[in-house]
């Protein structure tokens, strides 16, 4: 963020708040920095670790994976064990193993060796899943697109608005602790006191075998998305109309979606400062809460174009209208 503004501050939860502009409506643009992971819970006498999961994991995503533990002496690599097929009874072979039976193996022989590696209870554990480019250069595979893709959109938009004019004050906010309850967005919104807010997120793609059309209908490469519903928030309807308008005007395809079992930072932003019109804009992601996600580069590029065009539109009169709930004069 530093190349694009000198005005960077932090809230008391570690969220980063970078501001461009000194006058006009206060626009909060949000993406979260935390990723799905866990923390070391207990160390067994024979040197295995149990894990407290953080964020929404499926039990079936946990076995036979690589992880990194951020210990006091630096990162330590680990794997989650898996039962050996040679000893698993036939009737257990199709079973998903519950999270509380999962353990981390750091290659230690006993608890003393674990401690010698600098590992203790409470240390963060994150997926280990290296990035690569697929699809002839168009698709990116990696971990934590939720919400690194949102952060990338935020940074690229920030780069563009640093050199152009905009009719507002832009607060680009990278929040903490979204995956455990939208906590950093809550505190950051208290600091920013926005007039309007935009969350940038990883969406949920449904273009894979076995997906049900009622769950999500987003497709990779078919454009950025706008959530009309998720279980944490309802977007402001005038703001939704504005996003659709801008997308149409700019010739950007827009995917509309409603997703259950999904929370996003706009839910906390909209409850701040007496109530704030918000939307949640998403770049579709396959396999969000897992080690290996997939995004399409074109969706990212169009999302940046869409976001910058929306920010240009959010002048004082437009924001005043978004915040106006009075019935039309008769
Ligand atoms: Zn997210």
Image (cartoon, rainbow, N blue to C red):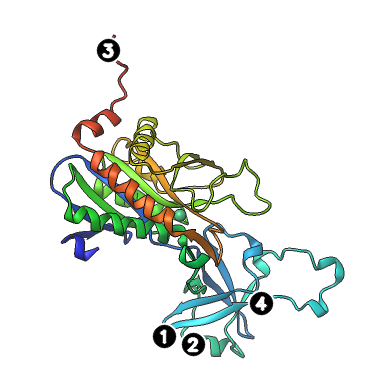
Direction from residue 257 to residue 154 in the image, left or right: left
Label 4 residue SS: loop
C-alpha span from label 3 to label 4: 66 Å
Residue at numbered disc 3: 329
**Cβ of disc 4 within 8 Å of ligand 1?**
no
At horizontal 22% and vertical 52% (from top left) the residue drawn is 161
C-alpha span from label 1 to label 2: 7 Å
Label 1 residue SS: loop
Whole-percent x, y for residue 225 in the image: 45, 45
At horizontal 46% and vertical 85% (from top left) the residue drawn is 118
Residue at numbered disc 2: 117
Upstream in the sequence, badge 3 or badge 2? 2
Residue at numbered disc 4: 81
- Where is residue 70, by image quadrant? bottom left
Label 3 crowding class (10 Å Cα cut-off): few <14, some 14-19, many 20+? few
Q: Nearer the viewer, mark 4 or mark 1?
A: 4
Q: Nearer the viewer, residue 108 or 260?
A: 260
Whole-percent x, y for residue 231 in the image: 52, 41
C-alpha span from label 2 to label 4: 19 Å
Upstream in the sequence, badge 2 or badge 4? 4
- Image quarter for ligand 1: bottom left
Q: Nearer the viewer, mark 3 or mark 4?
A: 3
Label 3 residue SS: loop
Which image quarter is the C terminus in? top left
Upstream in the sequence, badge 3 or badge 4? 4
Contact (CB < 8 A) between labels 1 and 2? yes
């Amino acid at each position: 963020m530093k190349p694009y503004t000198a005005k960077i501050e932090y809230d008391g939860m570690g969220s980063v708040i970078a501001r461009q502009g000194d006058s006009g409506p206060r626009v909060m643009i949000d993406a979260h920095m935390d990723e799905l992971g866990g923390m070391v819970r207990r160390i067994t006498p024979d040197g295995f670790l149990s894990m407290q999961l953080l964020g929404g994991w499926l039990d079936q995503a946990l076995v036979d994976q690589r992880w990194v533990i951020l210990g006091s002496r630096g990162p330590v690599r680990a794997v989650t064990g898996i039962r050996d097929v040679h000893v698993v009874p036939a009737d257990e072979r199709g079973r998903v193993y519950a999270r509380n039976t999962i353990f981390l193996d750091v290659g230690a022989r006993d608890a003393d060796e674990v401690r010698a590696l600098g590992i203790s209870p409470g240390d963060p554990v994150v997926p280990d899943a290296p990035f690569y480019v697929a699809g002839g250069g168009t698709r990116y595979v990696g971990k934590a697109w939720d919400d690194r893709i949102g952060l990338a959109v935020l940074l690229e938009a920030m780069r563009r608005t640093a050199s152009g004019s905009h009719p507002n004050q832009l607060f680009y906010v990278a929040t903490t602790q979204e995956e455990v309850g939208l906590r950093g967005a809550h505190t950051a919104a208290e600091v920013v006191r926005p007039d309007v807010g935009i969350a940038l997120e990883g969406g949920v793609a449904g273009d894979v075998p076995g997906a049900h059309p009622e769950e999500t209908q987003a497709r990779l490469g078919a454009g950025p998305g706008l959530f009309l519903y998720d279980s944490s928030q309802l977007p402001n309807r005038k703001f939704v109309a504005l996003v659709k308008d801008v997308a149409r005007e700019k010739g950007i395809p827009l995917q509309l979606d409603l997703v259950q079992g999904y929370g996003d930072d706009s839910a906390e932003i909209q409850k701040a400062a007496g109530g704030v019109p918000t939307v949640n804009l998403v770049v579709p992601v396959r396999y969000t809460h897992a080690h290996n996600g997939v995004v399409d580069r074109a969706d990212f590029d169009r999302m940046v174009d869409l976001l910058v065009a929306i920010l240009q539109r959010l002048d004082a009169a437009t924001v005043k209208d978004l915040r106006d709930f009075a019935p039309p004069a008769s």
